[in-house]
Each structure stands twice: as structure tokens, then as C-alpha cells.
Amino acid sequence: MERARRLASAGERRILGITGTPGAGKTTLSTALIDALGGDAVLIGMDGFHFGSTELLRLGRRGRKGAPDTFDTDGYVSLLHRLSRQREGDETIYAPLFDRGLEEPVGSSVPVAAEVRLVVTEGNYLLLESGGWGGVSPLLTESWFVSVDAEERHRRLVARRLSYGHATDAAEAWVTDVDETNAAVVDRTAGRADLVLIFDATHPTPPRSPTRSDATPRSTTATPHTAQGAPE
């Protein structure tokens, strides 16, 4: 938390990226940071840049929603670029969000005032380098990778699908065929993060020190709180 507070008190706009596999606890961690920092920070989710269901059907990608190529990557990078350049006195910038009830992105839903010091953005593919995602990392002041045991991740993801009203067999199939495939892609990006937090449902594990492939390592270590049943 102190690391985030330092970013929020830096005196100019900072962007903190929270990434990790589906079900790792990204949303839980990000929300906790926003709650603790109050008006000094705002949360922008990568999921707000999901393609809408109609477009996914047109592209033939509806059956693997959440994969790297089911997002408006250019739109996300463009927003982060605008946010990185926003300064006091500038107009408010609006970001989209993903409505879990509708299962659709909703535009211009999150206002970001110029006076807000820290933008926290969270999503799976912040450190991916292919498919247009490579434009994200250079815009992040810091990146934190949240990881969790694979068995616990699977349990959380199935529970999430069940909470949306899906049948057990359908939930298991989606997690195995879609979510776990995406998780494998995301896991390979952990080494590019400034900080890796490894959460276990019962026993906290100290994070390993990551390295960045494109810069001098800036990692530090910290002991995370245990995340139990984190939705994202």
C-alpha cells in the first residue's frame, strides 16, 4: 500500500498497471488500493475495451471472449496515452467500463479529473507484446503482476461462471477451454513486471523478484495479504 501511496503523492500523473491471469485477484487488489487512496486515485479497467457481443459474433470470436484479440487494443492504448498527458486544468477524460450484468462494455462511464494523481488500470494483457498490446507497457509508471496457485485460480473461475447463472458443465468447459488458455498466455508475461505478488488462498507466499525484458530491473519485494475468493 505504501508503494501505491508514493505513486499517488508524486506530484504529477502516474499510471499503475495491475495485471495477472484471470481469477488471480487483480480487481480485488485494485479496488482495495482505490478505497485506501480515496480521491487521489481512479480505477480504469481494461475490460471496458472488450468488443461488444455483436462485433464478436461478426468476427467469429464470441466463443472465446476474453482472448487477446477480443479487445479494442488501439482504443485502450489511446486512452492511456491521453491519461498520461493529462495535467491540472485539463478537461475531464471519460473511460468505459465493463458491465458484468449486461456482459457488455459501456462507454464514457468513468470520469478522470485532471487533479487525480494516480490512475490504476487493471487487466490481463498489460504486459503482452503482441497483437498491439506492446503499446501499453511504455505508458505505465509501474506494473504489478498478481499470481495465484493454478488450482485455486480454476476454482475461482468456475465459481464466477456459476454466479452468472451458467450450468456446472458449461462453467467447467469455459474455464478449461477459454480462461485457462488465456491464463497460459498471461503467465508468460510475469517476468516483465516491476513487482510480482503471489497470492495463496491459505498461505501467503513472498513474491519472487521479477525482471524486465526491456529495462533495468526495478523490482522490490513485499509480502502480500492473503487473497481469498478474489473475483478477478
Image (spheres, rainbow, N blue to C red):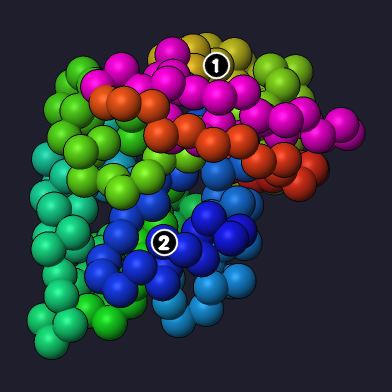
Q: Nearer the viewer, residue 179 or 38?
A: 38
Residue 142 seen in the figure: yes
Query: What residue do we see at 42% from left, 68% from top?
Result: 8
Q: Is residue 198 left or right of residue 88?
A: right
Disc 2/disc 1 C-alpha distance (Å): 32 Å
Q: Is residue 100 above or below residue 40?
A: above
Q: Is residue 109 above or below residue 31?
A: below
What range is drawn magenta here? 188-214
Q: Position of residue 217 (x, y in %)?
A: 38, 27
SS type, badge 1: helix
Q: Is residue 9 left or right of residue 112?
A: right
Query: What residue do we see at 25% from left, 22% from top?
Result: 214
Q: Position of residue 118 (x, y in %)?
A: 37, 66
Q: Which residue has dot 1 on it?
A: 180
SS type, badge 2: helix
Q: Amino acid at mark 1?
A: Glu
Q: Which residue has dot 2 on it?
A: 7
Q: Amino acid at mark 2?
A: Leu
For residue 42, which quarter of the picture?
Answer: bottom left
Neighbor class of circle 1 (other Cα within 10 Å; few <14, some 14-19, many 20+) is some
Is 201 inside the magenta-drawn segment?
yes
